[in-house]
Structures are given as C-alpha cells and as structure tokens.
Amino acid sequence: MNIIKQANEIQKDITSRFEERIQNQIAAGSTIDLYNVAISETLQDVYQEIENNKTPHIWSSLEGWKLDDTGTMFNLPRKTGENDTNYKYRLQRWLLSNEASNTTAIQNALLAPFEYVSNVDYHPYTKGTGTGTCYIIPKSYDTETINNAFIEISTIIKEIASPSLYVEYIIPTVKGIKLQVYISSIDGDLDTIKDNLETKISEYINKIAPGDYLEVGEINRMGINENNVDYFNVTALLIDNVVTSDIRVLQTIDSKMLYDEIIWAEDNGI
C-alpha cells in the first residue's frame, strides 16, 4: 500500500492542526503559512524515501547502485559490464531458485510424525549456497530402521526442495549412557522396582531431543517418586564408559545419547 503524501496534503494537515491549537486561522502568504509550505515540501521527500526503503524487493524500481546494493545483500554481485536489465533477471532467477529450496518449507515438512524417525534437524548452507545437512535420529539403531529412516526423510525433502539443492544426510553417532545408582527399599520388591525404573529411565534418555539436556536431577526425581523407594541417588554418570561430573549433558545434533545400563548398588552392598 502506497502511503506517500503530497506536499499540499501535508500542508493542509499541518495548518489544520496549528489552527486548532491557536483557535484562529492562518492567513495565506503569511510567514507561518510560508513556513508550513517549506516544511511540507521537505516531509514529502521524507515520505518518498521511506517508501523507497520499504520496497527494495520490487525489482522494477531498482537501478544503478541501488540494484548493486540488493545484489550485495544476496551475495550475488554484478558481473563486469552487466547492464541493469540482465542483472535484474539474474537476481530474480537466483531468488526463485532459492525459494524453491526454502528452509522454512523444508523445516515445516519435517515436523510431521514419522514411522522410523524420532527426530530430524535440517540446517541450510552447511557447505555453501544451495546446500544443507539433515541430522536424522532413527527410532532405533538397527540397520533396517536406519535405512528406512534415511529413505523416509530424503523422500520428503526431494518432494519439496529444488533439484539443485544438495543435502547431506547424517545419522548421529551413538553415545552409550550408563548410570551408577544407589537404591534402598524397606518394603518393596527391589527387582520389580529396578525393572520399572530401567524402563522409565531408558525411555527418558532415548527421547532427549537435540538442544535438550539429560538431567541427573530428573533421573533422581523419577527414582525417588517410584513406589516403595526409600532412597535413590545417581552416584555416577558415564558417557561411553567415561565418568563425567556434569549433572546436565547437552544432546547435540551430531551424536545421540542412548541408554546402556544401570549399575545398581543396594543396602547390602550388592
């Protein structure tokens, strides 16, 4: 929508506002009237400049250095000796090609629930313009599920993206999570309690999405809230058999934390 105001419209507006405040009319040709005319002409130029800067994407209005600035913004500079017409055409083709590989469209398509994939992260421009990387976390790490996860995601992206878009598909490496836990129960069946907790804790660890954290405090909360548990404490956290002192561990996109085992310690020292 064009909001440019002409100088005479601005002058009428200023004069009307001024007269309303002084409760009197401004005589044509008076000093204040001439001042309002000068201000109005200046403001008309301001409106025009605002409008020009609002619509740099309207190619038909760009020429010369303004067109060069737009090309610089898209990292597509003008070729030596290239005229405005050819340069506009090349910029338009570049924009249309990249819109076909629109990051937002790809990321929206990857929000749907999947049969073989628990989480997928798409990152554009990982190897330059027209490239991207998909980090795929399959629901399990057996060979069949991994292959099906790859096919599932690559098929979706091929339906959306431009054929010129190069996408690298990466299955994050596995990091095994072991826990050393001290547990105590006076009235409960420890074997049943441990089976229940292993199911809950393994499900919690395996579902941690990229960008979220494995929280030792959350595991302790799950343990102490289990029926008939009198004491529960994670005494050590091991990642790939290496003990870490961290109580919050970030799930990165290039590796996947998966539950390995719980090493239990009980009141009787077993």
Image (cartoon, rainbow, N blue to C red):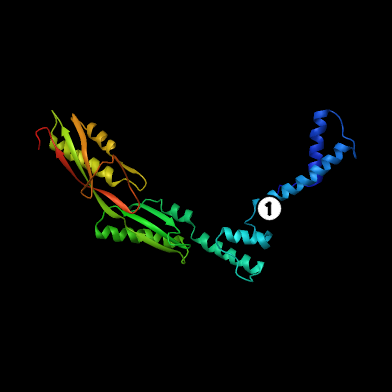
Picture residue at 36% right of the left edge, 56% below the top? 135
Q: Residues within 10 Å of mark 1 (few under 14, many from 20)?
A: few
Q: Position of residue 39 (x, y in %)?
A: 79, 42
Does any portion of residue 9 appear in the rendered image?
no
Task: Tell which of 148 and 31 is nearer to you.
Answer: 31
Picture residue at 49% right of the left edge, 57% below the top? 102
Q: Label 1 sits on what residue type?
A: Asn
As drawn, is 87 to the left or to the right of 104?
right
Picture residue at 80% right of the left edge, 29% below the top? 21
- The number of discs equals 1
Task: Tell which of 52 and 42 is nearer to you.
Answer: 42
Which corner quadrant of the image does residue 133 belong to?
Answer: bottom left
As drawn, is 99 to the left or to the right of 195?
right
Q: Position of residue 71 (x, y in %)?
A: 59, 61
Work out whether 160 lies above or below 17.
below
**Quadrant (top left/top right/bottom left/bottom right) for the C terminus:** top left
Look at mark 1 in the image and give the residue it sits on: 52
Does any portion of residue 109 appear in the rendered image?
yes
As drawn, is 66 to the left or to the right of 135?
right
Q: Position of residue 252 (x, y in %)?
A: 34, 50
Work out whether 85 lies above or below 241.
below
Q: Secondary structure at mark 1?
A: helix
